[in-house]
């Protein structure tokens, strides 16, 4: 019985292992989107135009940008020197990029 359970758990682990690369691909796509659309001004989570308004955790919190919705809203409509991406990126891409920004901020863009 114990052996059966071990085999069962190994099988599940194997399935998880085999299906994970699919997730990795979509992360890479979002990374490329960020590089092509945002990194020009926000390289490494910085901001070359307005240095204080960068994409690090502290600044995102300070300016109320610490949720995917808030970031997606900003990216859609733009703000001051930051361009709007509505029409240039799909809703899904904007949402993915916003989640990516938060995720990167969590580990300080390293
Ligand atoms: C032309 C330069 C430029 C590009 C390209 C750009 N941004 Fe920005 N971004 C800015 C500027 C300038 C601000 C500060 C706006 C302000 O004054 O409120 C900003 C602010 C932000 C903020 C808020 C930061 C904070 O601390 O409040 C986020 C989040 C953000 N940008 C994400 C993005 C994403 C995601 C992209 C790509 C889809 C992008 N930006 C592309 C210039 C840019």
Image (tube, grey):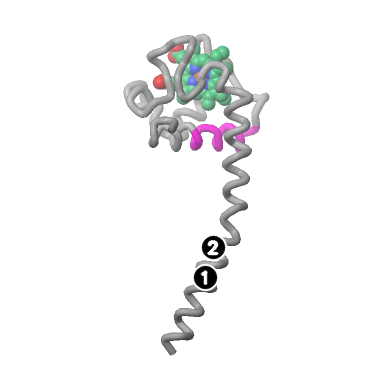
Specify the label residue 79 is tagged with.
Answer: none
Q: Quadrant of residue 106?
A: top left
Please identify the quarter of the rendering in which residue 31 is found: top right
What residue is at 59 percent from the left and 59 percent from the top? 19
In percent of width and height, residue 12 lies at 52, 70
Which residues are the magenta region?
90-100
Q: Is residue 21 at all visible to an observer of this figure?
A: yes
Q: Residue at x 44, y 31 (%)?
A: 109
Q: Quadrant of the C terminus?
A: top left
Label 1 – label 2 distance at C-alpha = 6 Å
Label 1 element class: helix
Q: Left or right: 18 with respect to 62?
A: right
Q: Is residue 74 visible?
A: no
Instruction: Please state the horizontal and vertical placement of residue 83, each as a whole percent of the image.
Output: 57, 15
Instruction: Report crowding for label 1: few under 14, some 14 to 19, many 20 or more residues within 10 A (C-alpha).
Output: few
Residue placed under numbered mark 2 in the picture: 16
CB-based contact (under 8 Å), mark 1 and mark 2: yes
At numbered mark 2, what does the secondary structure look like: helix, strand or loop? Answer: helix
Which residue is drawn at the image coordinates 48% and 85% (left, top)? 4
- Residue 62: percent from the left, percent from the top? 32, 22
Residue 12's label in the rendered image is 1
Point out the image quarter for the N terminus: bottom left
Closer to us: 85 or 54: 54
- Answer with left or right where residue 100 lies relative to residue 37: left
Residue 3, relative to residue 15: is it above or below? below
Q: Main secondary structure of the magenta part?
A: helix
Q: Is residue 108 magenta?
A: no
Residue 41 percent coordinates (x, y): 53, 16
Determine crowd level at label 2: few under 14, some 14-19, many 20+ residues with C-alpha closer than 10 A: few
Q: Residue at x 61, y 35 (%)?
A: 93
């Amino acid at each position: 019985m114990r052996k059966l359970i071990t085999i069962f758990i190994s099988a599940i682990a194997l399935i998880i292992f085999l299906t994970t690369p699919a997730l990795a691909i979509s992360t890479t796509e979002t990374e490329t989107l960020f590089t092509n659309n945002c990194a020009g001004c926000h390289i490494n989570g910085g901001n070359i135009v307005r240095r204080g308004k960068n994409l690090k955790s502290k600044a995102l919190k300070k300016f109320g940008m610490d949720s995917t919705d808030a970031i997606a809203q900003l990216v859609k409509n733009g703000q001051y020197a930051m361009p709007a991406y509505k029409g240039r990126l799909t809703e899904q891409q904007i949402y993915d990029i916003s989640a990516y920004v938060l995720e990167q901020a969590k580990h300080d863009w390293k």
